[in-house]
Amino acid sequence: MFENYDDILNVEEACEALKIGYNAMYELLNTGKLRGYRNGRVWRIPKAALVEYIREMAKMS
């Protein structure tokens, strides 16, 4: 899963991977539902965090 992406993604790449919009991505990051960190003003999201988020969402459905 996500083999075509680097280990650390920016918001644009993470949106593309999860097929969601920017507003939804920023909401996930700001509420802590998706792990990420800020490098200055830029969010960085570990690929492992995307996999973890998808697994959590799968458990809930």
Image (cartoon, grey):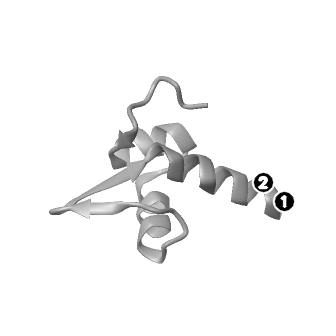
For residue 18, side relative to residue 13 (left or right): right
What is the quadrant of residue 39 in the picture?
A: bottom left
Q: Amino acid at mark 2?
A: Ala
Q: Is residue 53 above or below residue 18?
A: below
User: 11 and 36: which one is in front?
Assistant: 36
Asked if residue 36 is positioned above or below residue 13 in the image, the reply reads below
Return the x and y of residue 36 as percentages of the image width and height.
40, 60
Q: Are marks 2 and 1 in contact (CB under 8 Å)?
A: yes
Task: Give the quadrant of the C terminus.
Answer: bottom right
Q: Residue furthest bottom?
A: 31
| Residue at 61% over, 56% down | 53
Q: Identify the secondary structure beneath mark 1.
A: loop
- Residue 61 badge: 1
Q: Please tell me whether mark 2 sits on a helix, a strand or a loop.
A: helix
Residue appearing at x 54%, y 31% in the figure: 2
Q: Residue shown at 42%/49% (left/top)?
A: 46
Residue 11 disc label? none
> Residue tagged by mark 2?
58
